[in-house]
Image: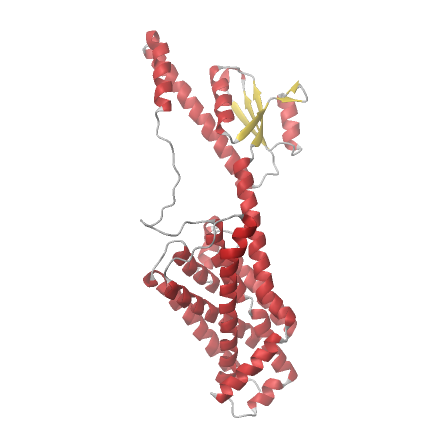
Amino acid sequence: MYRLLSAFRKEFLILIRDIPGLAILFIMPVLLIMIVNLAQKNALKSSKESKTDVLFIDHSHSAFSKLLRQNLDSSGLFRLISNLAGVPVDDEMARGKIAEGDYPVGIVVAAKDTSILLLVDPTLQPSYKNTITGSLTYFIKGTQSRIAIENLLKTLAPAMASGIDGLIGTNMKNMPPVTEIYATKEHASIKPSIIQNNVPGFILFAMFFIVIPLSGSMVTEKMEGSFGRLRTLPVKVSILLTSKVLLFLGVCIIQFFLMLMVGTWILPVFSGMPALQLGSHYGIILLATVCAALAATGFGLLVGSFATSQGQAALFGSVMVVILGVLSGTFLPVYLMPKAIQVISLFSPIRWGIDNYLEIFIREGTFGSIFPNILRLLAFFVFAMIVSIVIFARRK
């Protein structure tokens, strides 16, 4: 025990003297989560409050085109523009303005409703383009369906045309409203929010960045010969590595509580968003945190064992953490990624840790629901520990 405490004290002194490493561990994740959450909140607010400008060219002036304009105007999603600087917009002007990027999309209704053309800016991102064109197509098809049904009814009963219009209007007003709710468990106490979904990813992202100071200290010991001198003492390699594990396990737990403080108190003050809710399964949260911290420490041990220079360890470790973070859903939901990437992310320890937190923070899961990922995280740590001990035991 004395040897382990001595080794732990050595690691602690090395860590607290590494000011840049401490900044990476504690300041960088806080800044990242604040910037990302504020950016997402502003983007969400803008998407709800702003309207998309749409050039509208009506060559038909029919009942359909008038109803389409009315539906698009009343949707609150689009701002229809038919005149620019007092000049009516024609097809050629619309193509030029959209091609230059002044407007994202335009609608051209041909004479007698023979065709409907959507003009799209070729530089739009595919996801944004699909959202706009999908919404416009929905309104166009819905308007066409209503006109077709009204014409059919009036054809079958021409004497009742005015009455049919009144019945249609009355029925439309009596339609039940569409309400959006989350598919959560009955009597669930946690409500999903941006903070609720983002904090788990940044907890794991912060934890795995211990790879930089951890692998750096291991490389320094190898290069300066201090590890060789330690090997001359009656101290096992497992004790030396265990001291590193214990120290950085503590660092990860501090990071966890720091991110909780940011999500619970700091972000709500700066952004006005709801505070992070933890639920009541504190024991499960602690278990998930310890297992994720062990996996992050194991990753740092692997990088430090194989690296031969500090630059190599820092570059490879930081790049791999960013790649794993992106693959695992830290910055972008996994379901938006290609199927092949989604499959690859299943093998990421960061993904296992994030899924555990989402299960607890969003779905209010139980021990059974996170147990598979707990096993994966522990298996990864044991594998990393064994490989690191073997590599250091063989090193002369």
Q: Quadrant of residue 21?
A: bottom right
Q: Is residue 213 left or right of residue 261?
A: right
Residue shown at the point (55%, 77%) measured from the top left: 305
Give how far across and how far down residue 299 sits, in percent. 51, 70
- Can residue 242 be seen by looking at this rendering? yes
Give how far across and how far down residue 25 sits, in percent. 58, 67
- In the figure, 382 relative to 355: above or below? below
Q: Quadrant of the C terminus?
A: bottom right
Give how far across and how far down residue 387 sits, in percent. 48, 77
The single residue placed furthest to the right in the displayed view is: 85
Residue shown at the point (51%, 60%) measured from the top left: 261
- In the figure, 38 relative to 49: above or below? below
- Can residue 330 be seen by looking at this rendering? no
Give how far across and how far down residue 14 sits, in percent. 61, 78
- In the figure, 182 relative to 9: above or below? above
Residue shown at the point (44%, 56%) measured from the top left: 343
**Front in this rendered view, residue 336 or 197:** 197
Residue shown at the point (37%, 52%) measured from the top left: 189
The colour scheme used here is secondary structure
**Front in this rendered view, residue 157 or 81:** 81
- In the figure, 256 relative to 164: above or below? below
Q: How many marks are shown on the rendered structure? A: 0
